[in-house]
Each structure stands twice: as C-alpha cells, then as structure tokens.
Amino acid sequence: MQVSFLIPVYNTDPAVLTLCVNSVLKAAADHHQVVVADDASSNPETLAFLERCDRAGLANLKMIRTADNAGVSHALNLAAAEASGDFLAPVDHDDVVVSQGFSQMLRCLQYHRASWVYSDEIQVDANGFLIRRMYKPDYSPQLLRALMYINHLQLFSQELFRKVGGYREGFEGSQDHDLALRMSEVVEPVHAETIAYHWRILEETQSRSGEQMDLKTIDHSQQALREHFSRMGQPASVEPVLLRRHPDSEPEPIGVYKSRLEPNHALSVSVVIPCRLGTRKVVDGKERILLEHCLQAMSRSLSAADDHVAGGYKVQIVLVLNAEDDLAEAEESIRRHHLGGIAICDEPGFDFARK
C-alpha cells in the first residue's frame, strides 16, 4: 500500500514551504510518494525553492507546474492525476506532517480495512508555537454538516476520490469540506486517535479558530452543504453562525453553519381534545371557558410558529365531545379560531378512555 501526499503551492514563503516538504518527505520515507503542484507561482523565492526540489532528483518526489493560476482545487486534481499511490493525503503548503502520527494512521487504515481515515491535529502560530490541540470525535455526520472538523490529516483511497469526482473547481476555500461531504455519502471515515498534523494558523488562513472568513468561502460552504442535503433527499436552508469577537465588534462568520431541514412533503398532525362544552375553570385568576382558552392558545401558537415548522405541517383539531353536547357549536368554535378540524360526540355515559 502506497500513499501519495499532495501539496498545492502558490507563492508560498520558502521558509514554511521547506518545513512542509521536509516533514512530508520524512513521513514518506522511501516507500510513499510526494507530489508538489505549483499553481503558476510568480514569487522568485518560491520558484527558486521548487527548482532546487526538482534538481534534487528524489525518486519519490514529483514536481508539476500549471501554466496559469487556476486555484487550489485545480492544482490538487492535477496532483492526484499524477499520483501513483493507492491512497491520497492532501497537505497545505505551510503545514507540517508528523511522521510517527502518519505511521499510526497507516496501522489504523490496515486494521479497519478502511478507505478513509482522519487524525487529530495541533494548531500552531506563524512561528510554529502551540496554539491548541484538536482532539476530534469519531465520525459525526451532524458535526460535519456544521463545520469541517475532519480537516487534516486525511488519507482516502484513489478509488473513493475518483468515485465522487475529486475536488470541484468553484469551491475554493471550502474544497476540503465539499469533498468530505461527498465522500461521506459513500462511506464513513474512521478516526485515527493520533496527532499527525501541525496546522499553521496565519492571518490569511480560512479557519474555524475565530478569524474573519472570506465571503466567497462562506458562499462556497453554504452551497456545498445545500447540495449535500439535496443529494441526500433532505433539502435544507443553511446559514453561517455569527459571533462577536469583542463586545463592541460586529458579528463575524467563524466557519460554523446552522442547517434547518425542510420537509419535502406536508406532514399531518391531529390534536385530539376530549372535552365537554361550557366547562369553566379559574385560570390565572380569571374564570375561563376551558375549550375556548385551549383553542385560542393553539391558534396563537400556530400563528407565531416559525415558517420552517408551521409551513411543513397540516394541523387538524379533533374535538371529542360528550353525547349531550352541540356539534354545531363545537364546529363553530374551531372556525372562529381559524383552525381546521372536526367535532364528534361520544356515546352516552361518560368514559374518558373511550373518548
């Protein structure tokens, strides 16, 4: 079993790119492959570093370049097309792979005979100092639909990658989340409980760590989630969660999303109310006709209900009266409160269970 690491590069600082490539080469050793895809970088220092890598002549290091800057999804797809490994492992150009954690992931992959595994990670600052450790849960579809918690490091099979169509261009900034959602529709990933990745959080990083996110990234994530729900036969509305970084600041998106499933057909709910017309009782210090009080409360609640709730349900009122009660009067009460439903009379002789 061979793994191909995919590293998309665009005008990366040579200092962090050196750390990234060296860490991946160490993890790859002599058995695994490293594919570096340069997305038409123009930075002379970046280009000089890539030239040195090319001249190194390492058998398991493959360098490819694009003629035009087409985005990270395009670069990753090119790298995947050139990869010879059975599994793919995308790596951001400024991050670090932990070789021992990678070895643990391989053992997890083989033990579970999985086609997709993901690890825990450490977030570091620009200088490589620890910000936080990210210990992730086992696979949770609900959490994945809220944020891209799987993140790095991931190993997934070439077969799975090709089956879902690879990275989709037009989802830049959210390409990993979009791919993970589509792969989750085919197979559940396995969590390898090991730290295999150092994620470098820079000012421009589109992350869930509190940095303000690019509006295009937000749009792409919402689109990816909406399309995911649609493919699953569960249309949903998707909105970004906004938080204030400081009490006086404006709310900002943080890479977390709230989804509301939309019923694809009207659901019926029948509210059965056993009652006797004219029954009175003191409620909140006032004498009230109980049935009128009940219907009034239901009418008010349905009128104020969220559109996502009320719009998906058809509510029917069923009044079960005593034998001596007036059906016409009960039906008029239902209409008067703008509710739909029916009234029926029980047999003579009170029996609450029969009602």
Image (cartoon, rainbow, N blue to C red):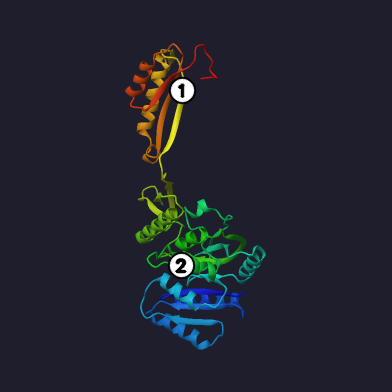
Nearest the eye: 123 or 85 = 85
Q: Report x, y in % for residue 62.
A: 51, 82
Side of 242 relative to 62 (left or right): left
Whether residue 64 is visible: yes
- The image quadrant that residue 40 belongs to is bottom left
- The image quadrant that residue 102 belongs to is bottom right
Q: Amino acid at mark 1?
A: Ile
The numbered disc on residue 150 is: none
The residue pinned by badge 2 equals: 165
Looking at the rendered image, the quarter that the N terminus falls into is bottom right
Between the C-alphas of marks 1 and 2, the distance is 54 Å
Whether residue 212 is visible: no
The numbered disc on residue 273 is: 1
Nearest the eye: 250 or 157 = 157
40 is higher (above) or lower (below) than 237: below
Q: Report x, y in % for residue 230.
A: 42, 53
Q: Amino acid at mark 2?
A: Gly
